[in-house]
Image (tube, grey):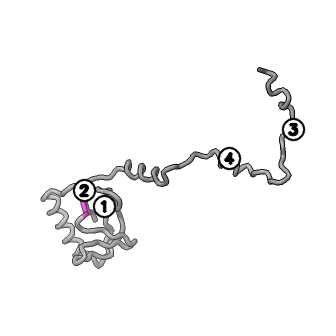
Amino acid sequence: MKEDYFDIINLPHHVSRNHPQMPMEARAAQFAPFAALTGYDAVIHETARLTDKQVELEEYDNDRLNRIFSELMDSLEKHPMVTVSYFKPDEHKAGGAYMTVSGKLKKIDTYEQIMKMEDGTVIPIGSIMDLQF
């Protein structure tokens, strides 16, 4: 068994005269894993991503938020500092995430039912869970 390749084991490596030698990067690419289903990993990661459900506020909490909004409307020209916790729906699946933003309030648009912050953040009034100023 040892002598099966004895006649060729010490021969020099063959180098072609007609074809250039393949670069090391191209040789390594031959052994890279093959992705048969393009985008499958992204779908798996999206499915595994967790979202929260929006919690409905109690009547007491709604009354408290309404009182705070009344106070804010009175001091809107001063652009008060506010901290707003709100629910932001997910763009791709059911549910969303709770966000908290702090900054100066620029405008409350009662027609569009949104709050605009000076940094450009737009918050739907119906999604607000907590408001402090």
Spatial CA span between label 3 and label 4: 23 Å
- Which residue is disc 4 drawn over? 28
Residue 132 in view in this figure:
yes
Q: Is residue 128 magenta?
A: yes
Q: Secondary structure at mark 2?
A: loop
From the image, which quarter does the C terminus lie in? bottom left
Circle nearer the N terminus (3, 2):
3
Which residue is farthest left? 59
- The tag earlier along the polypeptide, 1 or 2, is 2
Q: CA distance from mark 1 to mark 2?
A: 8 Å
**Where is residue 113 drawn, in percent x and y?**
24, 73
Mark 1 = which residue? 89
Q: Which mark is residue 54?
A: 2
Q: Amino acid at mark 3?
A: Pro
> Which amino acid is tagged 1?
Pro
Instruction: Name the front one of labels 4 and 1.
Output: 4
Q: Which residue is mark 3?
A: 12
Q: Earlier in the sequence, mark 2 or mark 4?
A: 4
Cα distance in 3D space between marks 4 and 1 = 44 Å
97 relative to 129 in the view: left or right: right
Task: Kindly indicate the quadrant of the structure image that contains residue 67.
Answer: bottom left
Q: Earlier in the sequence, mark 3 or mark 4?
A: 3
Nearest to the eye among marks 3 and 4: give it: 3
> Are the two marked residues, 3 and 4, in contact with CB atoms closer than 8 angstroms?
no
> Magenta residues, as a range?
127-131
Q: Residue at x 21, y 67 (%)?
A: 68
Question: Dot 3, crowdedness within 10 Å: few (<14), some or many (≥20)?
Answer: few
Bin the neighbour count of mark 2 within 10 Å (Cα to Cα): few under 14, some 14-19, many 20 and up. some
Q: Position of residue 101 (x, y in %)?
A: 35, 63
Disc 2 marks which amino acid? Gln
Residue 89 occupies quadrant:
bottom left
Gap in angstroms between the C-alphas marked 3 and 2: 72 Å
